[in-house]
C-alpha cells in the first residue's frame, strides 16, 4: 500500500522564462535568494506548482520536500478534470498526489500552513489520516474547504494539537451547509482564530462548551452558518476580541432569527443578517453586561424592538470609534439619538423607522470627536448636529426629495445639514441634493453655508441647466478647494447651455486637480471642461474617465485639446472606463 502511495503521479511540466520573448532559463536569480525568502515566495503557490518547479533548477530539485506551506486544491491540479475522468477517478488521483507529498516530505519539518480543498466521500477516512499527519508535524494554520454529504468530525489529535493557532472550516455553499460534529473533549489550547463558513451547528450547549475550551481565542468569524434552535449567542471566553456573524444571504428557516450577544471582551462586533424584510432582532442580554472594550460595531439587517437597548448599547461602549448601521430598523422610534464622546466614524445606510409618514423621523448626532460621517437615505431627514467640530469627511446620499414635504421644510432641513457640515475638508454629495439646492435657491436665503476648510469636493450630477449655478455656487463657497471630482449621472438629454466666464477664488488660487468620471462628451459636459480650463489658473491635472460605450473619443479629444487654457502647466489625461459605476460605491 505504501509503495503504491509513493508512486510519482504524472505532473505537467513547469517552465520559467527569464523574460518575455526570451530564452527559457533556470531562474538563477531566484535560486540565489536565501531559503526562507524562497519559502515565502513559494508559499503563495499551490503545492502542485512547487513540485513542478523542481524541474527548473538543480537547487530546487528537492525543495518541495522541505517547504512548510502545503496547498492542495482538487479543482486546480488538472485542467478540466471532470471532462477527462469520473468524479471517483479524480478523487483517487487527488488522494494519490496528497499521499505522495505527505509521505515524501521530511516529517521533522513543522507545517506552518496547510490548505486543503476537496470532496469527502462516504466512509472515507483519508481526510482523518491527513489531519493526523499534519497534527503530528505541528501545523499552525489549517484551512479546510470540504464538500461532504456526511457530518465531519475533527479527530482528537487535531483538537489536542498544541501548535494550532488558526482554524478555518468551509463545509459547503449558500445552498448547502455541512454538519460539523463538535469535539466533546477539551482542546485547542493555543487557538486564536476560528473561521466557520457554511457549517451547520446542531447543539448550542456543545458549541458553547467548544468555545469555552479555547482560552486564547481572539477572532471568531461565522459566515452563512446554520444555527439550529439558537436564541442566545453566549461566548464564554474572556479573550475574544473580534466577532463576525455574516448570514446576509440566508433566509428562513436558516440562520438566527433573534440574537443576544454576551461577551464583555469584544473590541469589534459585526452582525450581518438576512436581507429584505427578514431582519434579525437584536435583544438586550439577560444581564447588565455591556461592551466596555468595544471599538467597532457593524450592524446590517438588525431590528431593535426596544430602542432604549440601542441607546444603552452606545452609552455602555465608552471606547466605540466606528459605528456602521445598514438597513437596520427601529419600529417604535421617531428620534434616533447618537451621542458618543469616543465615536470617530459613523455610517447610516437606509435606516428604517416606524410610522406611516415618510420623513417624519429626526436624527440627532452629538459626537464631538467624529471625523467621518456618511448617510444614505431614501428621504432627507431632520438633522440636529451638535458639536461636530472635528468632522473632516462627509458623504450625503439621498435617493428622493420627498414630494409629500413642503419646499420650505425641505430647504430648512437642507440648511441644517449644510451648516452642520461647513467645517469638513472632504465633502461628497449626490445629485438629488442639487434638486433640493435648486429649491433652496428659489427660496433665497437657505443656502448660506461656506466651506472654508474644504479641500476636496466630490459631486454626482446630471448636466441639466439648473445644475450649473449650483456647481458655481458651491465653488464660490469653497475658497480653498484643491480637488474637484464630478461623476456624471444617467445619460439623459438636456438643452445645451453656456457658462459665463467669471473669477472664482478657488479656481484662481487653489484648484489643482479635476477628475471627470463617466464622461460621455455631450455638449454640456464639454462646456464644463471649457469653463474649468479657461478659469483654472493654477490647474495642474484634468483627468477624464470615459463612459464605456463612447465611440467617438478621438473627435471629443480633438475638440478638448483646442480649448484655451489659463494654466500653462495643466496636463490632460484621458483614461479608460472605470469599473466603478455606482456613485454611492465610492464610499465602500
Image (tube, helix red, strand yellow):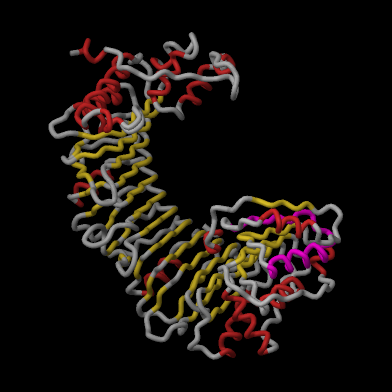
Asked if the magenta segment contains residue 534, the reply would be: yes
The percent position of residue 196, horizontal first and vertical second, equals: 31, 45
Q: Which of 4/195 is in front?
A: 4
Q: Quadrant of residue 214?
A: top left
The percent position of residue 365, horizontal first and vertical second, equals: 54, 73
Whether residue 279 appears in this view of the structure is yes
Q: Is residue 121 left or right of residue 317?
A: left
Q: Is residue 514 left or right of residue 183?
A: right
Q: Which residues are magenta?
A: 523-547
The percent position of residue 220, horizontal first and vertical second, equals: 35, 47
Q: Quadrant of residue 85?
A: top left
Whether residue 343 appears in this view of the structure is no
Q: Residue at x 38, y 75 (%)?
A: 330
Tell me if residue 112 comes above or below residue 469 in the rendering. above
Asked if the magenta segment contains residue 346, the reply would be: no
Q: Quadrant of residue 70?
A: top left
Q: Residue at x 40, y 53 (%)?
A: 266
Question: What is the quadrant of the N terminus in the image?
Answer: top left
Amino acid at each position: 500500500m505504501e509503495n503504491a502511495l509513493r508512486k510519482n503521479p504524472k505532473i505537467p511540466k513547469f517552465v520559467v522564462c527569464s523574460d518575455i520573448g526570451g530564452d527559457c532559463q533556470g531562474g538563477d536569480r531566484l535560486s540565489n535568494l536565501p531559503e526562507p525568502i524562497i519559502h515565502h515566495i513559494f508559499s503563495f503557490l499551490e503545492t502542485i506548482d512547487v513540485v513542478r518547479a523542481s524541474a527548473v533548477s538543480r537547487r530546487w530539485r528537492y525543495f518541495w520536500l522541505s517547504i512548510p506551506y502545503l496547498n492542495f486544491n482538487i479543482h486546480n491540479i488538472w485542467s478540466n478534470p471532470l471532462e477527462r475522468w469520473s468524479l471517483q477517478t479524480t478523487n483517487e488521483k487527488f488522494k494519490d498526489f496528497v499521499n505522495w507529498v505527505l509521505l515524501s516530505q521530511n516529517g521533522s519539518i513543522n507545517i506552518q500552513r496547510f490548505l486543503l480543498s476537496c470532496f469527502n466521500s462516504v466512509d472515507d477516512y483519508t481526510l482523518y489520516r491527513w489531519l493526523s499527519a499534519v497534527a503530528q508535524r505541528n501545523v499552525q494554520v489549517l484551512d479546510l474547504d470540504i464538500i461532504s454529504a456526511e457530518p465531519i468530525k475533527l479527530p482528537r489529535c487535531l483538537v489536542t494539537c498544541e501548535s494550532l493557532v488558526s482554524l478555518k472550516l468551509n463545509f459547503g455553499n449558500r445552498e448547502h451547509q455541512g454538519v460539523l460534529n463538535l469535539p466533546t473533549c477539551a482542546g485547542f489550547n493555543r487557538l486564536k482564530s476560528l473561521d466557520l463558513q457554511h457549517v451547520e451547528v446542531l447543539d448550542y450547549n456543545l458549541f458553547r462548551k467548544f468555545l469555552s475550551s479555547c482560552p486564547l481565542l481572539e477572532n471568531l468569524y461565522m459566515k452563512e452558518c446554520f444555527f439550529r434552535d439558537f436564541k442566545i449567542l453566549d461566548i464564554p471566553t474572556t479573550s475574544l476580541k473580534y466577532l463576525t456573524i455574516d448570514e446576509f444571504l440566508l433566509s428562513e428557516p436558516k440562520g438566527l432569527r433573534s440574537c443576544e450577544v454576551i461577551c464583555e471582551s469584544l473590541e469589534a462586533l459585526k452582525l450581518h443578517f438576512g436581507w429584505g424584510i427578514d431582519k434579525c432582532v437584536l435583544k438586550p442580554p439577560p444581564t447588565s453586561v455591556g461592551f466596555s472594550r468595544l471599538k467597532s460595531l457593524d450592524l446590517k439587517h438588525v431590528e431593535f424592538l426596544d430602542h432604549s437597548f440601542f441607546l444603552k448599547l452606545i452609552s455602555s461602549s465608552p471606547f466605540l470609534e466606528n459605528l456602521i448601521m445598514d438597513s437596520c430598523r427601529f419600529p417604535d422610534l421617531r428620534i434616533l439619538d447618537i451621542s458618543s464622546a469616543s465615536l470617530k466614524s459613523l455610517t447610516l445606510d437606509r435606516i428604517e423607522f416606524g410610522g406611516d409618514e415618510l420623513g417624519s423621523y429626526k436624527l440627532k448626532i452629538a459626537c464631538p470627536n467624529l471625523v467621518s460621517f456618511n448617510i444614505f437615505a431614501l428621504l432627507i431627514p431632520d438633522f440636529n448636529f451638535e458639536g461636530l467640530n472635528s468632522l473632516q469627511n462627509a458623504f450625503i446620499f439621498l435617493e428622493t426629495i420627498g414630494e409629500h414635504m413642503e419646499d420650505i421644510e425641505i430647504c430648512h432641513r437642507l440648511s441644517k445639514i449644510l451648516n452642520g457640515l461647513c467645517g469638513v475638508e472632504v465633502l461628497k454629495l449626490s445629485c438629488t441634493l442639487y434638486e433640493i439646492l435648486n429649491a433652496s435657491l428659489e427660496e433665497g436665503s437657505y443656502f448660506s453655508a461656506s466651506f472654508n476648510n474644504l479641500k476636496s469636493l466630490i459631486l454626482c450630477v446630471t448636466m441639466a441647466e439648473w445644475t450649473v449655478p449650483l456647481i458655481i455656487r458651491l465653488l464660490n463657497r469653497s475658497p480653498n478647494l484643491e480637488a474637484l471630482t464630478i461623476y456624471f449621472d444617467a445619460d439623459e438629454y438636456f438643452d445645451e447651455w453656456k457658462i459665463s466666464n467669471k473669477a472664482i477664488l478657488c479656481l484662481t488660487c487653489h484648484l489643482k486637480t479635476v477628475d471627470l468620471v463617466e464622461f460621455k462628451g455631450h455638449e454640456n459636459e464639454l462646456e464644463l471642461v471649457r469653463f474649468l480650463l479657461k478659469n483654472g489658473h493654477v490647474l495642474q491635472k484634468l483627468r477624464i474617465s470615459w463612459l464605456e460605450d463612447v465611440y467617438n473619443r478621438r473627435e471629443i479629444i480633438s475638440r478638448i485639446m483646442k480649448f484655451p487654457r489659463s494654466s500653462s502647466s495643466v496636463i490632460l489625461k484621458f483614461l479608460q472606463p472605470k469599473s466603478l459605476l455606482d456613485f454611492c460605491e465610492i464610499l465602500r
